[in-house]
């Protein structure tokens, strides 16, 4: 039975998509079978695996509307051991389409249940907001992984996210847990990065991953080539960090 991890933080630009792509690819490189689900209408996870998001007939949008089955939507082996449930800008309309639909919070969960036991890990990239798509992701997930950027406003909004996670746990998904926090864009040369890490550790009663994802130019370049970092530049600091994070995730699960 696959472990479902939602990568969530309603702040944009904290490394959710980078983490979803590269954690998935690193888990796959270690022999795990992984499904990545892109629930962000920007579709950056989809294009980050080299898929043309504008040229897709069946995406998560069609799945949510009941126009195709999950088997028809999944793109098998976009890279070795990684399959993808893609997204594109059409998904932005899902909020409106879902109004008045019964048990709309469970649409994604009901579909994922059909394929859950075919994968070791299912990674869901959430949009940068606490909307119906994020709620669907949290209802589907076993746990939530929160990337936090090492910058001044890191803690802002985090209490809101934890509140949402607790509400979903209370009302929709009693099995939901906090997987933990991973620091992204860490720069060991600055006092700020170290202060943010200490600040979050002192305020948060959560699991915090030992691996910190560095600020790394190769990580920023990789998506424009449609490749995860371990394929684009396997010797980079970013590739090494995500491999270490994958080891931590495997050992915890």
Image (cartoon, rainbow, N blue to C red):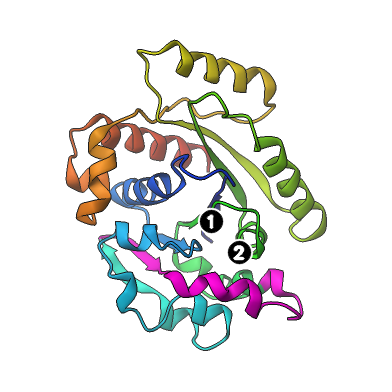
Residue 160: name its quadrant: top right
In percent of width and height, residue 248 lies at 45, 35
Q: Which residue is mark 1?
A: 127
The answer to whether the residues at label 2 and label 1 have Cβ atoms under 8 Å apart is yes
In percent of width and height, residue 78 lies at 28, 65
User: Cα distance, mark 2 to mark 1?
Assistant: 7 Å
Residue 163: name its quadrant: top right
Q: Residue at x 56, y 28 (%)?
A: 208
Which disc is residue 133 wearing? 2
Residue 167, compared with residue 66, is above or below; it is above
Q: Is residue 76 left or right of residue 68?
A: left
Q: Residue at x 67, y 77 (%)?
A: 98
Which disc is residue 24 wearing? none
Q: Residue at x 60, y 71 (%)?
A: 108
In percent of width and height, residue 117 lies at 51, 67
Q: Which of pointers 2 and 1 lies earlier in the amino acid sequence?
A: 1
Q: Please, what secondary structure does the residue beneath circle 2 have? A: helix
Q: Is residue 219 magenta?
A: no
Q: Is residue 95 magenta?
A: yes
Residue 56: name its quadrant: bottom left
Please name whichever residue, 247 or 128, is drawn nearer the observer in this view of the structure: 128
In percent of width and height, residue 135 lies at 67, 60
Which region shows up in magenta?
80-106
Q: Is residue 206 left or right of residue 39?
A: right
Query: In which quadrant is the N terminus drawn?
Result: bottom right
Residue 241, compared with residue 85, is above or below; it is above
């Amino acid at each position: 039975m696959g472990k479902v991890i939602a990568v969530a933080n309603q702040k944009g630009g904290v490394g959710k998509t980078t983490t979803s792509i590269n954690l998935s690819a690193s888990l796959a490189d270690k022999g795990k079978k992984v499904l990545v689900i892109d629930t962000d209408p920007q579709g950056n996870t989809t294009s980050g695996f080299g898929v043309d998001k504008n040229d897709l007939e069946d995406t998560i949008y069609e799945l949510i509307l009941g126009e195709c089955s999950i088997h028809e939507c999944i793109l098998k082996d976009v890279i070795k051991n990684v399959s993808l449930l893609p997204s594109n800008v059409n998904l932005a309309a899902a909020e409106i389409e879902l109004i008045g639909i019964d048990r709309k919070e469970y649409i994604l969960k009901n579909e994922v249940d059909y394929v859950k036991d075919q994968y070791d890990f299912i990674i869901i990239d959430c949009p940068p907001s606490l909307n119906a798509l994020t709620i669907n992701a949290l209802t589907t997930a076993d746990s939530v992984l929160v990337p936090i950027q090492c910058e001044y406003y890191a803690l802002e909004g985090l209490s809101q996210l934890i509140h949402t996670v607790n509400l979903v746990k209370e009302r929709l998904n009693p099995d939901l847990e906090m997987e933990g926090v991973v620091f992204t864009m860490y720069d060991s040369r600055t006092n700020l990065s170290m202060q943010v890490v200490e600040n979050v550790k002192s305020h948060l009663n959560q699991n915090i991953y030992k691996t910190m994802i560095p600020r790394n130019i190769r990580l920023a370049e990789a998506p424009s080539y449609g490749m995860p970092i371990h394929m684009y530049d396997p010797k980079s600091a970013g590739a090494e960090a995500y491999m270490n994070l994958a080891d931590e995730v495997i050992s915890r699960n």
